[in-house]
């Protein structure tokens, strides 16, 4: 449904997107992850015809983004991080206005309002942030497009509103729509996409399913360890495992779990502490994201990640 070939965008001497290539399959949620300024929004703007392509090719629903812009626009709905709906109009008035612009059937408006439980007669400007985002997504569906671009759809939303939007995204995908999702929200990255591309400084640095992305950190296992009492001497003893704190647990990177357990037993006998909790887990998408997007020369802090003792 979406294909980019060596897609490039330059602004003068600055290259915002640098020769990226990928394909998005019909009916999948494709996650496009990256830190602020990595090129996510610029990519969406090129694919949706909102900004010109400097070099390369792009196709959406079979249409050439450069040469068949009308076909592309009929095939897509775009939800940007800032809504373009009118505050002084009601939800229904906004949707009816858009339906006329797109020459969409008027019955689409009442159906969408009902399907997504929107307050039809309430002015858009009076809605909560969660309902504003929901109404913005519905507005992108008014002409029934097969492809939806969602650019940071849960940014600045509270936890409840963000969950509501994620449930809406799942429902749209189950209904058969292809979704291109840009985000740096790791909750969304872990739960929504079928496949993920990570972009950094305008280049794609990783791409694949969630399990494939996690394997990029190699065969390391994360060990979560809680002990009492926790002493500085234990952290020094485990220094080769890159200890870091997450909440109230010590997290370690271990390659050989059996050898680690033998060593931990020896350290326990020597230092004298009680193991309260010990568990293992695969690297998260967030771990991979941070590893691949870390700026060169970035300050890491102390080896234990900022220990509290």
Image (cartoon, rainbow, N blue to C red):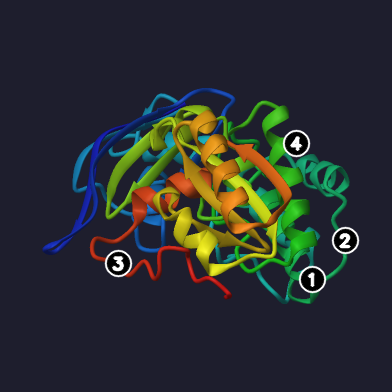
Mark 4 or mark 2: whose residue is earlier in sequence: 2
Find residue 127 and name its label: 1
Mark 2 or mark 1: whose residue is earlier in sequence: 2
Label 1, secondary structure: give it: loop
Q: Residues within 10 Å of mark 2 (few under 14, many from 20)?
A: some
Mark 4 or mark 3: whose residue is earlier in sequence: 4
302 shown above or below 95: below
Find residue 298 and name its label: 3
Residue at coordinates 68% horizontally, 57% vertically from top-left? Answer: 273
The answer to whether mark 1 and mark 3 are in CB contact below 8 A is: no
Q: Position of residue 184 (x, y in %)?
A: 51, 55
Q: Is residue 203 visible?
A: yes
How far is disc 1 from disc 3 in space, using C-alphas?
41 Å
Q: Residues within 10 Å of mark 3 (few under 14, many from 20)?
A: few
Residue topped by disc 2: 119
Residue at coordinates 31% horizontally, 42% vertically from top-left? Answer: 204
How far is disc 4 from disc 3 in space, using C-alphas?
40 Å
In the picture, residue 266 is in which quadrant? top right
Label 3, secondary structure: give it: loop
Residue topped by disc 4: 171
How far is disc 4 from disc 2 in space, using C-alphas?
19 Å
| Foreground disc of the pair 4, 2 | 4
Q: Nearer the viewer, residue 89 or 115?
A: 115
| Foreground disc of the pair 1, 3 | 3
The answer to whether mark 2 and mark 1 are in CB contact below 8 A is: yes
Does residue 265 appear to the left or right of 15 in the view shown?
Answer: right
Q: Nearer the viewer, residue 218 or 26?
A: 218
Residue at coordinates 52% horizontally, 49% vertically from top-left? Answer: 252
Label 2, secondary structure: give it: loop
Mark 3 or mark 2: whose residue is earlier in sequence: 2
The answer to whether mark 4 and mark 2 are in CB contact below 8 A is: no
In the picture, residue 185 is in which quadrant? bottom right
């Amino acid at each position: 449904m979406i294909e980019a070939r060596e897609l490039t965008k330059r602004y003068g001497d600055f290259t915002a997107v640098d020769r990226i290539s990928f394909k998005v399959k019909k009916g999948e949620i494709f996650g496009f992850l990256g830190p602020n300024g990595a090129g996510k929004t610029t990519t969406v703007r090129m694919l949706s015809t909102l900004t010109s392509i400097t070099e390369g090719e792009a196709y959406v629903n079979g249409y050439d983004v450069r040469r068949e812009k009308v076909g592309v626009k009929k095939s897509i709905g775009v939800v940007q991080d800032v809504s373009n709906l009118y505050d002084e109009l009601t939800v229904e008035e906004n949707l009816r206005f858009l339906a006329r612009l797109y020459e969409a059937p008027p019955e689409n408006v009442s159906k969408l309002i009902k399907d997504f439980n929107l307050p039809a007669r309430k002015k858009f400007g009076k809605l909560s942030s969660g309902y504003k985002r929901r109404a913005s997504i519905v507005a992108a569906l008014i002409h029934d497009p097969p492809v939806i671009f969602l650019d940071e759809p849960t940014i600045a939303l509270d936890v409840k509103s963000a969950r509501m939007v994620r449930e809406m995204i799942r429902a749209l995908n189950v209904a058969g729509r292809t979704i291109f999702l840009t985000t740096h929200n790791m909750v969304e990255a872990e739960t929504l996409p079928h496949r993920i591309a990570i972009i950094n400084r305008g280049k794609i640095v990783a791409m694949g399913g969630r399990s494939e992305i996690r394997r990029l950190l190699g065969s390391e296992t994360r060990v979560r360890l809680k002990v009492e009492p926790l002493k500085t001497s234990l952290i020094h003893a485990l220094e080769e495992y890159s200890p870091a704190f997450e909440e109230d647990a010590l997290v370690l990177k271990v390659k050989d779990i059996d050898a680690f357990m033998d060593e931990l037993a020896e350290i326990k006998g020597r230092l004298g502490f009680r193991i309260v909790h010990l568990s293992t887990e695969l690297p998260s998408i967030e771990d991979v994201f941070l590893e691949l997007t870390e700026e060169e020369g970035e300050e890491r802090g102390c080896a234990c990640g900022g220990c509290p003792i």
